[in-house]
């Protein structure tokens, strides 16, 4: 299974939830398969999905799911201690770990080699760290949402991409409808 | 020292009065008092960040979640935050007050700090970021207007605070 299949499978589970989507193909896939106003698409700024998600979770009570990538977490590794030490039980970080920089042509990352992001997250002090396989993504996400505990999910999958169109929504429109869905 | 403490208080009071509820910081010696003052306030969530771009991401999320946010950082962080400032804060039109210690100016004991100081205003100018320079202690009284301006304009706005300002003469 590859990332696009995980994202497609998660669409029903994430319906109505506040979702921060990582730059590149993850956002494009989410937009293609399950666009909704409560999705915040990152059009740039590699690395900050988890940080935006944490800020959002700290600021309001609704559940926030930040979808991130292994390469992006590696580029902003400082995020994991910040998450661990600013615990908020409405925050779920899903790291889709395909072992590669998928959006730029599947160049390998260190997460696909010797580095375990789940072990890093635990070492950083994160309490509920779940490593799972692509096939388990839906059930693990359902359990994490139901648990009302801050959870870090590292979902391992194969690298590989499907063709998806770019997002042409204006960033201000993305933010406006996102903020409106939070207030609703 | 006493005047310094009052500058810290004036600044954090202004943040509080402008309904800023979440502040991220990466410390600087010149900012230790203002960060300590922030720690005393129950009305504001303080989230220490490991890197300033991470802090700006947290601020963006907090603002969209309904809490006004701000960052406190050193001017040496401007390089690592350029991409975030343009592709997140500016692109999505998010307001972000940035209280910045302007190291490398008059009174600076550390030569290395001068290297970033000479680029600071040029970089902010290049990014089109409204920039205010606090050089004398009385400049602090502009802070309230600057914060109001930031949330009116939906832009990142820089407040550079140099050593002469903090020395309080
Ligand atoms: C600062 C910066 N460097 C490089 C890129 C190019 N880039 C965009 S997405 C991406 C890969 C992200 O990989 P990962 O987070 O693992 O997500 P995946 O696409 O594999 O799901 C890269 C390197 C960028 N956008 N910004
Ligand atoms: Mg990847």
Image (spheres, helix red, strand yellow):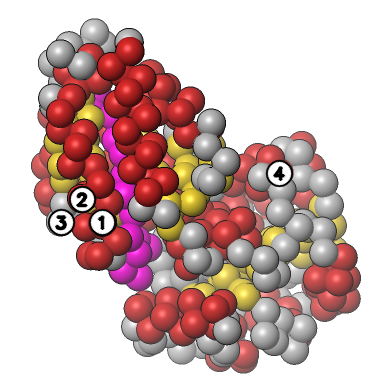
Give me the disc on residue A82: none
The reply to whether the magenta stretch includes residue B81 is no
Residue A160 point in image, percent of width and height: 63, 75
- Residue closest to the eye, A29 or A20: A20
Mark 4 or 2: the one toward you: 2
Q: Earlier in the sequence, mark 3 or mark 2?
A: 3
- Residue closest to the eye, B84 or B8: B8
Q: Chain of mark 3?
A: B
Q: Earlier in the sequence, mark 1 or mark 3?
A: 3
Mark 3 or 2: the one toward you: 2
Q: Which quadrant, please, contains the C terminus of chain B?
A: top left
The image quadrant of residue A18 is bottom right
**In whole angstroms, how far apart are the C-alphas of marks 1 and 3?**
18 Å
Q: Residue at x 61, y 64 (%)?
A: A60
Q: To which residue does mark 1 refer?
A: B148
Q: Chain of mark 2?
A: B
Residue B11 point in image, percent of width and height: 33, 36
Helix, strand or loop at label 3? It is: loop
**In the rendered image of this protein, does residue A11 appear above or below residue B70?**
below
Q: To which residue does mark 4 refer?
A: A84
**In the rendered image of this protein, does residue A148 appear above or below residue A178?**
above
Q: To which residue does mark 2 refer?
A: B145
Residue A129 point in image, percent of width and height: 82, 52
Q: Are marks 1 and 3 in contact (CB under 8 Å)?
A: no
State how many labels appear. 4
**In whole angstroms, how far apart are the C-alphas of marks 1 and 4?**
33 Å
> Counting other residues with Cα less than 10 Å from the Cα at mark 4, is it few (<14), some (14-19), or many (20 or more)?
many
Q: Residue at x 46, y 89 (%)?
A: A165
- Residue closest to the eye, A55 or A70: A55
Q: To which residue does mark 3 refer?
A: B128
* Tags 3 and 4 both on a single chain: no
């Amino acid at each position: 299974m590859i990332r696009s299949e995980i994202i497609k499978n998660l669409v029903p589970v994430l319906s109505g939830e506040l979702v921060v989507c990582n730059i590149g193909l993850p956002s494009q896939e989410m937009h293609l398969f399950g666009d909704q106003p409560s999705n915040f698409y990152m059009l740039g700024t590699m690395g900050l999905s988890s940080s935006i998600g944490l800020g959002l979770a700290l600021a309001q009570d609704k559940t926030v799911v930040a979808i991130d990538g292994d390469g992006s977490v590696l580029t902003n590794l400082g995020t994991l201690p910040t998450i661990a030490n600013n615990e908020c039980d409405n925050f779920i970080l899903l790291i889709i770990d395909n072992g590669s920089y998928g959006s730029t042509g599947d160049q390998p990352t260190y997460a696909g080699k010797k580095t375990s992001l789940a072990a890093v997250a635990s070492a950083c002090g994160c309490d509920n760290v779940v490593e799972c396989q692509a096939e388990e993504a839906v059930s693990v996400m359902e359990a994490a949402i139901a648990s009302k505990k801050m959870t870090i999910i590292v979902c391992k999958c194969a690298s590989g991409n499907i063709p998806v169109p770019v997002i042409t929504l204006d960033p201000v429109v993305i933010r406006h409808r996102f903020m409106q869905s939070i207030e609703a | 020292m006493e005047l310094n403490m009052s500058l810290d208080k004036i600044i954090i009071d202004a943040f509080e009065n402008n309904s800023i509820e979440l502040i991220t910081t990466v410390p600087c010696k010149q900012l230790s008092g203002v960060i300590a003052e922030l720690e005393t306030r129950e009305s504001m969530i303080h989230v220490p960040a490991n890197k300033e771009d991470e802090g700006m991401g947290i601020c963006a999320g907090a603002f969209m979640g309904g809490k006004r946010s701000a960052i406190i950082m050193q001017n040496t962080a401007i390089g690592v935050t350029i991409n975030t400032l343009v592709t997140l804060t500016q692109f999505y039109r998010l307001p972000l007050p940035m209280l910045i210690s302007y190291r490398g100016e008059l009174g600076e004991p550390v030569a290395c700090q001068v290297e970033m100081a000479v680029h600071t205003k040029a970089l902010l100018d290049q990014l089109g970021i409204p920039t205010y320079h606090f050089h004398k202690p009385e400049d602090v009284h502009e802070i309230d207007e600057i914060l109001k301006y930031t949330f009116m304009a939906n832009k990142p706005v820089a407040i550079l605070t140099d050593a002469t300002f903090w020395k309080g003469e």
